[in-house]
Amino acid sequence: MKSVFTNPRQRQETPNKVKAWLATGDRSQRLELVFLPAYSPELNPDENLNQDLKRHLRASTDRPTDKPTLFKAIRSFLRSVQQRPALVSAYFHSATVTYAASPQTISSPR
């Protein structure tokens, strides 16, 4: 399984040190760097996670009423998502996350 890192910068803005590090050894086989346009929430899998979190908090019968309780509810939700790799994968492969269907991999430094 490859780990995917998203980068909100354009390819030419990615520091050469990062490109060189990714190209070292077998990192390019294990890691992938994909690029997002500067502002594109509809393409960002984080937005799908945020939407699920909000939906979960709204549906909760015991809604948080202060910051500590809110943080606890968020942490609990995120931990439950962590235990569901299929759901995490779905965030990257939903219909709106178009960049994930054809990721741009950095295999050598430019």
Image (spheres, grey):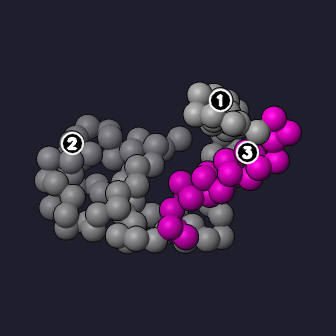
The residue identified by callout 2 is 21
User: Which mark is first along the chain, 2 or 3?
Assistant: 2
**Quarter of the image where one finds residue 6:** bottom left
Label 2 Cα crowd, 10 Å radius (few <14 / some 14-19 / many 20+): few
Q: Which residue is mark 3?
A: 57
- Residue 83, given in percent of the width and then of the height, sits at 68, 31
Task: Name which residue type carries label 1.
Answer: Thr
Horizontally, residue 93 falls left or right of residue 22, namely right
As drawn, is 106 to the left or to the right of 55? Answer: left
Q: Does residue 92 appear anywhere in the picture?
A: no
Residue 61, quarter of the rendered image = top right
Give the residue type at disc 3.
Answer: Leu
Report the residue marked by disc 1. 69
Q: CA distance from mark 3 to mark 1?
A: 11 Å
Q: Which residues are magenta?
A: 41-62
Q: Is residue 34 magenta?
A: no
- Residue sitting at x 21%, y 42%: 21
Q: Is residue 63 visible?
A: yes
Q: Are marks 3 and 1 in contact (CB under 8 Å)?
A: no
Q: Quadrant of the C terminus?
A: bottom left
Residue 101: x and y in percent read 55, 67
Decide: is 37 above or below 20: below
In the rendering, at what x and y percent does residue 14 appear?
21, 58
Query: How packed is label 3: few (under 14 Cα within 10 Å), some, or many (20 or more)?
Result: some
Q: Earlier in the sequence, mark 3 or mark 1?
A: 3
Count residues near mark 1 (Cα–Cα under 10 Å), then give few for <14, some for 14-19, many for 20+.
Answer: few
Question: Mark 1: which secondary structure?
Answer: helix
- Name which residue lies at 39% across and 45% down: 31
Q: Amino acid at mark 2?
A: Trp
Measured as percent of width and height from the top left, residue 56 is found at 75, 46
76 is higher (above) or lower (below) than 91: above
State the separation of the CA atoms marked 1 and 2. 40 Å
